[in-house]
């Protein structure tokens, strides 16, 4: 157990008195601002623990105030983000205290004032140098079976937080969010909605540990989508944003009653900028689904108005989204036209497959603002490519900045496996630029910025949640090396059945092993084996129809350059080729004018040709990352005489 530095709780009599005063404020006549007249000694005795019981836990736009007073503007009229709005009677209409808003099974209550919510415990913790040094020595020490999934277990570091898991609880979730979530769940249907599996994952999210979940069934596969995971991380993100706003609002109210000489160190509750949640997604149509679900899971009191919804639908949606269900599920007839592509390819790439997008979402009083200024948004939903472009722009233009990434406290990377097909290095670069010191002056009161932001320790407080259909070495590396949350890590470990049985029985599969001494030499050893053992047999044979499949683009380039040096008869099928060039290469290969076709996994991912005529011999230079691609590519041999699939592998290919 990590030792947390907490201040002794306020006496029960003081809590009752404060609660009574709060009730008196609510009864004041509307249209008038009323300040509580409280004894200064009582005010000074309040501490961080008391913050969960005192004042109005407002659900309005977060203000940024100076102790001596600052310029105040109406929050709904201010999108510049320099100064946020002050409290009004209309704001108070939707205010409610934390005694009413924290679920009894997961956070602080008036009767159980000793327990702080996981939100407070996580952000108020004073990180020691020893804890930072121990990040390099974390070991996964416990396993817990996943409810409803027999082949998977959760593995974690530190204390086993799932040992005494309560399937009936959603710890730390605000009452209004919980009630609305349950109402939406009842109308949405689906066996995974509001299930123990969902609540277990939400418990992991609310623990603020880094999470790697790479067995999430995506929406584009046939069958029921695993919406429970998406709902859980959306509710956790909303909960984090609203609790942050409540904390700032209550401290503003307390600071207004203190004199200028009072100690305000305990009121540090903000970051350099406002955005707290960053969600990385691969395509605009995926962002469309997530944002629509986020709006749907937002309680009605917060979304009386949703601004720019038409603009959002036009930019992120597509023709197939106009008739989708209210709960975000895809209709079976979303693609009624006959397509030569597989079902999952049409759902993922058949709609708006734009991969350069970014949108800010801001919650103000009763309004959800889409396309808000990035520096003053609560959520930022973007693709890695768009953020990478903005990062590169700042290097060329000093007037631009990405300071809105400086105070991200929850990072969610959904559909990580699809991003791996795009370019995982973009994700790696984005993570590296999170939680850096801003390049311009902070847009908030410096005296309100948390100490660990000023000490450049924000990355140790950032929670990272990585979700995907499968994992790979790049994803694992980012999780192990770029996720440094002091709370610890949890990851899903699964046993897979394999897909070799899906290859047609008449196709002969031959696995050829080559020796590798170290991971540093793995690529060179694979290439040398291909050059000395595999290529001579292809070159000496008069038979054409040989397809060489390479998983990565770097392998593709290396083999292409070698074939050029040997004056080999070959054509290319790469991801960066124009469609007309791809069809031209296929025609030359089918007609036998080219003996070899060299293709990559990413090219297959984006085009998914069900049939490439003329394939007689298949060389798997490296195994595909996506398991469903292996039988698809091997079955291209269907129709040829004596079909042979030869796959190269080493001991380092175990995960694939």
Image: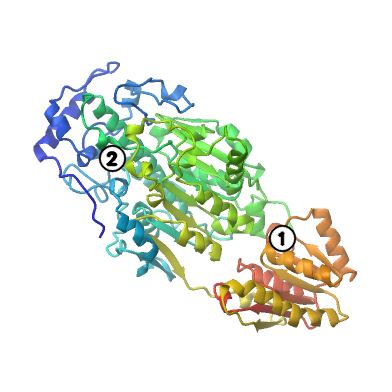
Could you say which is closer to the camera, residue 24 or residue 383?
383
Distance Cα–Cα, label 1 vs label 2: 50 Å
Does residue 143 show up?
no
Task: Point out residue 371 in the picture as x, y percentages from the top left corner.
Answer: 54, 33
336 with respect to 212 (left or right): right
Taking the image as shown, residue 584 lies to the left or right of residue 263, namely right
Q: Position of residue 288 (x, y in %)?
A: 56, 43
Provide the residue designation for mark 2: 101
Give the SS element for disc 1. helix
Q: Residue at x 86, y 79 (%)?
A: 543
Element carrying mark 2? helix
Image quadrant containing the N terminus: bottom left
Residue 33 relative to residue 605: left or right: left
**Mark 1: few, some, or many residues within 10 Å (few <14, many ≥20)?**
some
Task: Answer with mark 1 or mark 2, whichever residue precedes in sequence.
Answer: 2
- The answer to which image quadrant residue 255 occupies is top left
Placement of 567 over or under 250, stated as above or below: below
Quickly name the residue at label 1: 603
Residue at screen point 28% across, 45% down: 124
Residue 622 in the figure: left or right of residue 532: left
């Amino acid at each position: 157990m990590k030792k947390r530095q907490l201040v002794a709780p306020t006496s029960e009599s003081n809590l009752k008195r404060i609660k009574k005063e709060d009730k008196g404020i609510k009864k004041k006549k509307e249209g008038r601002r009323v300040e509580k007249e409280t004894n200064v000694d009582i005010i000074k005795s309040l501490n961080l623990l008391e913050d969960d019981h005192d004042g109005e836990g407002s659900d309005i736009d977060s203000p940024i105030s100076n102790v001596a007073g600052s310029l105040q503007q109406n929050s709904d009229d201010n999108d510049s983000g320099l100064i946020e709005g002050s409290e009004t009677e209309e704001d108070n209409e939707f205010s409610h205290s934390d005694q009413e808003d924290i679920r009894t099974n997961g956070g602080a209550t008036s009767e159980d004032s000793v327990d702080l919510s996981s939100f407070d415990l996580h952000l108020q913790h004073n990180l020691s140098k020893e804890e930072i040094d121990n990040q390099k020595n974390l070991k996964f020490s416990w396993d817990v079976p996943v409810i409803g999934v027999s082949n998977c277990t959760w593995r974690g570091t530190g204390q086993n937080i799932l040992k005494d898991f309560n399937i009936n609880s959603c710890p730390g979730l605000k009452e209004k969010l919980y009630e609305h979530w349950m109402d939406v769940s009842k109308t949405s249907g689906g066996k995974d909605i509001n299930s123990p599996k969902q609540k277990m994952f939400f418990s992991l999210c609310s623990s603020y540990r880094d999470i790697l979940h790479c067995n999430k069934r995506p929406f584009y596969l046939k069958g029921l989508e695993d919406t429970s995971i998406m709902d859980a991380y959306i509710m956790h993100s909303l909960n984090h944003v609203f609790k942050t706003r409540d904390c700032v609002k209550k401290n503003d109210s307390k600071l207004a009653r203190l004199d200028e000489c009072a100690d305000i160190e305990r009121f540090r509750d903000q970051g350099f900028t406002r955005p707290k949640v960053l969600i990385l997604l691969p395509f605009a149509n995926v962002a469309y689904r997530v944002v629509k679900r986020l709006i749907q899971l937002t309680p009605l009191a917060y979304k009386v108005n949703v601004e720019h919804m038409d603009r959002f639908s036009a930019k992120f949606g597509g023709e197939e989204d106009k008739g989708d269900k209210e709960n975000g599920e895809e209709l079976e007839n979303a693609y009624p036209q006959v397509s030569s592509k597989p079902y999952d390819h049409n759902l993922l790439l058949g709609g708006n497959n734009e991969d350069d997008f970014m949108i800010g979402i801001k919650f103000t009083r009763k309004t959800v603002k889409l396309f808000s200024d990035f520096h003053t948004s609560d959520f930022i939903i973007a693709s890695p490519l768009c953020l990478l472009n903005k990062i590169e722009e700042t290097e060329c233009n000093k007037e631009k900045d990405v300071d809105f990434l400086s105070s991200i406290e929850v990072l969610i990377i959904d559909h990580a496996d699809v991003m791996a097909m795009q370019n995982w290095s973009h994700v790696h670069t984005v993570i590296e630029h999170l939680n850096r010191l801003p390049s311009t002056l902070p847009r908030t009161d410096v005296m309100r910025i948390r100490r660990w932001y000023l000490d450049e320790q924000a990355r140790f407080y950032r929670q990272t949640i990585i979700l995907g259909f499968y994992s790979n070495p790049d994803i694992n590396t980012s999780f192990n090396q770029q996720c440094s949350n002091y709370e610890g890590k949890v990851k899903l470990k699964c046993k897979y059945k394999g897909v070799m049985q899906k290859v047609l029985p008449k196709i002969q599969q031959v696995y050829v092993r080559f020796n590798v001494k170290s991971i540093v030499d793995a690529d060179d050893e694979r290439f040398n084996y291909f050059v000395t053992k595999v290529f001579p047999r292809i070159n000496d044979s008069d038979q054409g129809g040989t397809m060489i499949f390479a998983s990565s683009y770097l392998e593709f380039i290396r083999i292409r350059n070698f074939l050029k040096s040997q004056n080999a008869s070959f054509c290319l099928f790469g991801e960066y080729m124009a469609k007309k060039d791809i069809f031209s290469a296929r025609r030359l290969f089918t007609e036998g004018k080219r003996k070899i076709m060299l293709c990559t996994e990413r090219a297959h991912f984006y085009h998914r040709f069900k049939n490439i005529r003329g394939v007689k011999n298949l060389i798997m230079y490296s195994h595909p990352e996506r398991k469903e691609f292996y039988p698809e590519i091997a079955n291209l041999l269907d129709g040829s005489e004596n079909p042979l699939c030869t796959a190269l592998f080493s001991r380092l290919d175990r995960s694939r």
